[in-house]
Image (spheres, helix red, strand yellow):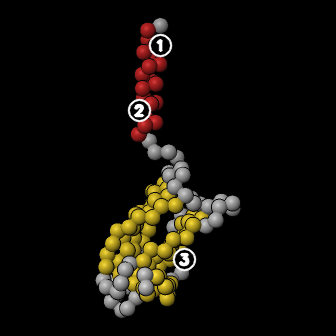
Amino acid sequence: MRRIATATLAAGIVITAFSLTVKPADASVGFWRTVGLSGVDAYGFYNTEATKVTLNFDLKDTKKDGYSAALRFTFTGTKKQKDDVRVVALQGDRLQDKWQTVTSTRLKHLYIQECRGTWKKSKFTIKKCAGWRQHY
């Protein structure tokens, strides 16, 4: 009887320890990098969890030409959810490099588009964009 109790206790401890150290099956981590639009260089990591996705990325403006680098993100969800669109742009026209974070509760797909634009009176206007790229 003691052996059965000890074996059961040991199995319970192993299962508990395993469940605390393993990521959920629906979580995924990935890397992405922009390609295509001159003057914009960006890369980062995404982490999808059960209820949200988090993007950590580095956005660089590689040209001093009067335009600022920007990224446009579209997160898609279920048919009942409206797409979540975000634009992140660097301030001003100068060579810059800045780490940023974006989160969303739309988990189905992530699309990223590199853009160039201008600032006028604290408002960013997109002038040119590359094509959309699906990252998950």
Where is mark 1, residue-wise?
4
Mark 3 or 1: the one toward you: 3
Foreground of the two, 100 or 18: 100
Q: Residue furthest bottom?
A: 65
Q: Amino acid at mark 1?
A: Ile
Where is mark 2, residue-wise?
17
Please indicate whether residue 113 sits to the left or right of residue 82 in the image.
left
Disc 3 versus disc 1: distance between alpha carbons? 59 Å
Please indicate whether residue 83 sits to the left or right of residue 3 in the image.
right
Q: Residue furthest front?
A: 121
Q: Residue furthest top?
A: 1
> What is the crowding at mark 2: few (fewer than 14 residues within 10 Å), some, or many (at least 20)?
few
Disc 2 versus disc 1: distance between alpha carbons? 20 Å
Q: Amino acid at mark 2?
A: Ala
**Dot placed on the residue nearer the N-terminal end, 3 or 1:** 1
Foreground of the two, 23 or 126: 126
Where is mark 3, residue-wise?
132
Please indicate whether residue 87 sits to the left or right of residue 97 in the image.
right
Q: Residue furthest right?
A: 79
Q: Where, by quadrant of the figure, is residue 116 drawn? A: bottom left
* SS label for mark 3: loop
State whether residue 80 is above or below residue 66.
Answer: above
Q: Amino acid at mark 3?
A: Trp
Mark 2 or 1: the one toward you: 2
